[in-house]
Image (spheres, rainbow, N blue to C red):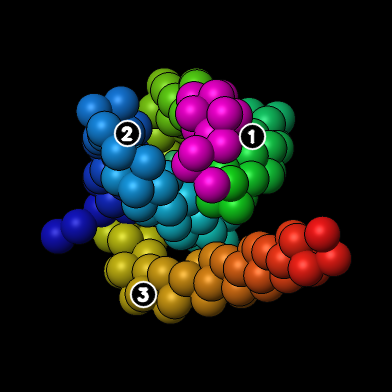
Amino acid sequence: MANAIDLIRQDHEKVRDLFDQFERAVTSLQKKEIAEQTVMELEVHAKVEENFFYPAVRQVGGIDSTMNEAEEEHHAAKLLALEVARLEPTNPYFDAKYHVAKEMVLHHIREEESDVLPRARELGDARLAELAEEIERRRLEYLDEVRRMLRGDLLAMIKGLIERSREATGRHGSD
Ligand SMILES: [Fe+2]
Ligand SMILES: [Fe+2]
């Protein structure tokens, strides 16, 4: 039977793999696609942790300051990840932003694996299995939510691009 700790670790591996894929990517299009997938995975993973995993781990006691810090790291990483998703891969800061987000997330994942997951074991097998079920049940819904959120963001970006090109055409027109 699946256990919530294993699911969290699997997500971490997926994200580490995307980071490696980004380093191997050659074209801007490949980078853009990998960056979008990274943001999607991170958003869904953060939702799973914040809504199910973290509240459960807090119940083991004496870990609130660690969990508060983890939540703040999610907050900071999300802001940065969204900026990456909005940026064109040809922007000179695209790689820099992705790399800073990656370092931040890798640090967070390492702390989670060393400080949070071992304490989560104290929840016991039955509770961890129950949590895994809840997580699996909600994951698709979260994926859908995040896709819609990113698409909304993308539409706003496209609108901005169209307006900018209209302005540029206007300028040419008056030349
Ligand atoms: Fe996390
Ligand atoms: Fe995590």
Q: Residue furthest left?
A: 1
What separation in Å lies between label 3 and label 1 (alpha carbons)? 24 Å
Q: Secondary structure at mark 3?
A: helix
Q: How many numbered marks does the figure carry?
A: 3
Earlier in the chain: of badge 2 and badge 1, it is: 2
Image mark for residue 73: 1
Q: Taking the image as four quarters, which one is ligand 2 found in?
A: top left
Query: Which residue does the image show at 39% across and 28% down from the upper left?
Result: 113
Q: Amino acid at mark 2?
A: Phe
Image x and y of residue 54, in percent: 55, 48
Give how far across and how far down residue 136 sits, in percent: 31, 68
Separation (CA) of disc 2 from disc 3: 25 Å
Q: Give how far across and how far down residue 132 sits, in percent.
A: 32, 61
Quickly name the residue at label 3: 140
Along the line of sight, the residue nearer the viewer: 25 or 107:
25
Q: Residues within 10 Å of mark 2 (few under 14, many from 20)?
A: many
Up-down relation of residue 78 to residue 141 (above or below): above
* Quarter of the N terminus within the rendering: bottom left
Residue kind at label 3, given as amino acid type: Leu
Q: Residues within 10 Å of mark 3 (few under 14, many from 20)?
A: few
Residue bearing the label numbered 2: 22
Q: Is mark 1 within 8 Å of ligand 1?
A: yes
Magenta stretch, residue numbers: 88-101
Q: Residue at x 59, y 29 (%)?
A: 93
- State the SS at label 2: helix
